[in-house]
Amino acid sequence: MSTINQRPVSNTPIAYGLMSLSPTMGVINGMEVALEFEGALIEGNRKSILGVTDVSCFASFGIKGTEAASWLMSQSIQIPMNRNTWVEHEGYLVLRLGGSEFLIEGQYSEDQYSHEIFEKLARFNQATVAGVYKVQRADAAFILSGSEVLNMLSELCMLDLRDSALASNTLVMTQLASISAILLRHQLNGEQVYRVWCDGTYGAYMWNMLLEVARELGGGAVGLASHFRGTHK
Amino acid sequence: MSYQNKDNMRLAKKIGEWIDRDKVIKFSFEGEDYTGYEGDTITSALWANGVKVLGRSFKYHRARGVLSLANHDVNILVTDGVDTNIRADVVTLQSGMTLKVVNTEGGVVNDKKKIIDSISALLPVGFYYKAFHSPAVLFPFWEKFIRKAAGLGVVNFNYPRITQRKLNAYCDVLVIGAGPSGLSAALMAASNGLEVILVDENQQLGGSLVYDRAGGNAAKEMLDELSVKMAETPNIKVYTGSYAAGYYADHMVPIVTAKGITKVRAKTVIAATGAFEQPPVFRHNDLPGVMLGSAAQRLIYRYGVKPFNTCVVVTANAHGYRVALDLLNAGCTVVALVDMRAEADRDQYVGELARKGVKIYSSYCVYEALPSKSKLGVRGVTICPFDEKNGTSNTANSITLDCDGIAMSAGWAPAAALLYQSGMGVRFDNDIQQFVPNSLPNGIFAAGKVNGVYNIKQRGLDGMRAAAAALQYLGKSVETINVDHHQGASPSHFYPIVMHPKGKNFVDFDEDIAVKDFINAAQEGFDNIELMKRFTTVGMGPSQGKHSNMNAIRILAKIRNLPVEKIGTTTARPFFHPTPFGHLGGRSFHAHRLTTIHMWHKAANAVFVDVGAWSRPAYYQKSGLSRIETLQQEAIAVRQSVGIIDGGTLGKIEVCGPDAGLFLERFYTGKYIDQKVGTTRYALMLDESGVIVDDGIASRLAEQLFYLTVSTSNAAAVYREMQRWLQIWQLNVGLVNVTGAYGLINIAGPKSRDVLAKLVDIELSEANFPIGSALETQILGFSARIIRVGFVANLAYEIHMPSAQALNAWKALMQSGVKEGIRPFGTDTQRLLRLELGHHMPGYDTDGLTIPYEVGAEHALAMDKPFFVGQRSLQIIAKKPRNKILVSFVLPLDYSSEMPQDCNLVIDDGVIKGRVTSVSYSPAAKCVIGLAYVHPTQNQLGATFEIRTDNGSLAKATIVKTPFFNAE
């Protein structure tokens, strides 16, 4: 597994929440994350019902400011044109948070992890670009999968997140389990999943709440390996 | 022992009944074993077993049986194990239930408290207010006595915490009530492509179509037809056994089910909530065996239970005739039908009843129900001619009839609580003697009985009319549907009240309120409906007036000789039925924040404290040491060597852009435009009235980048305030809240430099990196910001790094400091350390009124600036005398009396002059030190003042300079 730089291995924001589960851990993108909890069979079943996966290890880059949109375009990064929407490119997502803030998140792929984009972004120096400010990100990031996701979200969030109400390229900045979160609906390996980001310091809390509900509904923790072949090395 | 006659009242199978006779359920009631069927309610199962004394009344402990069988009264409340106040009329029977009636002493049959009934004449409403008001000293005694005598179930404080899910749902149309109107409305809305949610509190759909059959099958056939259509319509989501608990803004209606609450947000709402049947009022109308006609019908058709063997039907509308036919159909002997109206022969069922041998007494009333010898049931009824216009009965011509029960049908009251909550305006329709909607808010529609439509076919049509209106509201093109106004006799009698010189003619069954109580209340001057409600408590019992408010309004109207519409109605508040706290609370969402070092703290025996949403180590417990001893050891480590604290919880905000310095100059009290890159300045934040809100450090990391630290619990509020002011000032500034994105470690003590120096490639000497310095560097290969601070020690460094790396940095520092004896310390120790240096903390040493002049913060005020938030207030305040000032004090070295605590008062000659804000024993100063507010005249070095401790003793404090010890 390649990494963007050679920093010491860091901890996922939900590390404290993982302690009692003793998952098989692995290092992805310089961060130690849970690859597997109970094995492929059990987690495959959970994933189809209600799986909760920590993907905080995905590379991320935040930026805001009145000139942020034009700067990103100058870096050949296509951005969503409308506020609170998102676009996906090969290997990364670009989320437009409101009008002038962006979150760019690398997606895992077996052979390419959008190095170039993130290496280029990492070189950003706000002292040299007017109206553009870096937003240090440390989100806890999750994938929610399975048939019961909307059931879970109907308890954790008061917004209407059904397909008919949440357009495919729309993101919502809302409250999930009483804390601020970003949420969108996404296709992953041909399956519909929901993506959730929240402040990493709430990560363990969010993980525990998601798992508590997921277990009640027949799901549970799903390791990264269940979604991304090749991570379990 | 038992009055309960145990007759088998179960009927042969009824078409459409709700019970499954193949599934027998065993349970016990008041210590005796019974059986019922799956689908029975507790009450229906007991009635089927011939058990008719099912409860005792709240005040007089009168025997009670079935009244509405619909959760419109609380005659029957039972306890099962730890659960109490179970509404037996509607709660489904479960195997193994061990039921006891609430509010009895000696059981429901032999309740010793029934003696209260015999002295009820001495206990009219308002009696308590007058009799026990004085002497006041005796009131606690009486209160205890009254509470024991009255009351409902006993709260079990060991009741398990059972929380239920609270869900959110959405639809185009929410239809409340699944009777003929609601079903028709739902079907029409759904057939036009709308997403519909249909909710009904009953276990099955149909409303009165299930049981109001007039001895025939027409209603059942109509229900079957609607049910088939429902089954064929996928876009209707049905909630049965669930009630719409209230109406809130934007069409939000919480639906309460056995398993939790679903908050439905609908685009439109159709209330097809029906009406509550209202009892006529006559003496002993509360005896077991006297029940509403609809209750008798429910027993027959839902549960296959015969309500009576021999009965009288008293009515004032067509519904009573339908009830009589249903009773005949169930095998009951109907001795007579007593119609309170003068023109009873208008009703279509008169002939049919006559053919079946039922004698009809028109212009008669039930003067009184005759109690059995034990007063636990009905042995007969006295009827007499009734002048409905005057409300008088001719007792000279009374007739006594033998029977074991009475079915009552005198009228209806609209179930309009949700419509009232939505803002409905009402008018009184004299044709039907009912309040009906006069104006409804946008998107709210009413249909069926609640809308004043009683004819069965018109009710279905009215549902469709409401659906059409809802469709039009949503922009759909459909034709308007018209519904005929009510034709024929009124479904409700204008005054179904029969006076009796001996009273006991009950209006409100929850609270044992009889007609004379209203008359007395009016005589006392409580003749407004809201005042009368509070004096008599009518409608204030658990059923919230569902069966009593309308009669109370009619009685008050008659007393005041006013039309009903002039009396008005009382307020209907959520919730429609009592709802368990576990439902209301739902799952616990107590969001908490953890730093990435939390795991390490836990492993190191940290004792945590909540600071805002954060969980922080207060100290690290050492075995054999008390909390105080542990704090002092942690403090000594910092003073003598080096300590380390996780400060990741501190608020961290980046202020960027060309106007960043100007923004800070306006936001904080100090100067920042001329601040050099690589330096820090104190940042004191005031509100517009000049009160201290927060403080922190502003580090200038680049020409257009300031890095602010703010206090842990104020971080969100400060950032929000910054955003607000930026909107107002429109400066060229970007704000980035990086509180969670950056970890922060504070390493402090004389050897902190040595420990840190091993991990960074910068010169940390005093000359090169003095206090007030800040820079960006690398630590362990990742970027970090290092700030020289002096909050807890003269030599201390804050290290800010990406939060994902904070644990690595923490471990590296701990490893680096092994030789120096590095020790972690928590927030409690931090408070002691800063106190030793004499630093006040906003929130601890200030309150919501403290201004900078009162804490000696004048040095932080750049009053010569053109503007900062709070400046103008300070300019005014500065001209006024102070009445308090924060001073530092010590207690004598040999002080050994009661230890002063935070918030103990400063006393001068018996007068309060101030209070202690922080106090602790300082191992560095070797005495008790603290901060306290005193009167400015007391503020002289060496002056003394007295602190009143918790045990009342006075501690003599001396004002000193800070720091409290030789920090060099």
Image (cartoon, coloured by chain):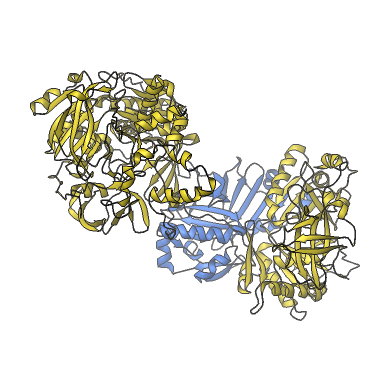
The percent coordinates of residue B5 (x first, y second) are: 16, 49
Q: What is the quadrant of the N terminus of chain B in the image?
A: bottom left
The percent coordinates of residue B560 (x first, y second) are: 41, 21
Instruction: Tell me which corner region of the image, top left, top right, bottom left or bottom right, holds residue A29.
Output: bottom right
- In the displayed structure, B536 sits above or below B921; it is above
- Please state which of residues B367 and B433 is positioned toward the viewer in this rendering: B367
- Please state which of residues A1 and B83 is positioned toward the viewer in this rendering: B83
- In the displayed structure, B751 sits above or below B94; it is below
Chain letter, colour yellow: B
Q: Colour of chain A?
A: blue
Question: In this image, A166 relative to B799: left or right?
Answer: left
The percent coordinates of residue B425 (x first, y second) are: 45, 24
Question: In this image, A185 relative to B230: left or right?
Answer: right
Farthest residue, direction front: B135
Instruction: Tell me which corner region of the image, top left, top right, bottom left or bottom right, holds residue B183.
Output: top left
Residue occupying the point 23% across, 43% down: B375
The percent coordinates of residue B420 (x first, y second) are: 44, 30
Asked if one can make out residue B215 in the rendered structure from this viewpoint, the answer is no
Residue occupying the point 61% across, 45% down: A96
Q: What is the quadrant of the C terminus of chain B in the image?
A: bottom right
Residue occupying the point 43% across, 67% down: A40
- Please state which of residues B944 and B676 is positioned toward the viewer in this rendering: B944
- In the displayed structure, B358 sits above or below A179; it is above
- In the displayed structure, A70 sits above or below A226; it is above
Question: In this image, B451 relative to B672: left or right?
Answer: left
Count of marks, rendered view: 0
- Please state which of residues B875 and A196 is positioned toward the viewer in this rendering: B875
Asked if one can make out residue B121 in the rendered structure from this viewpoint, the answer is yes
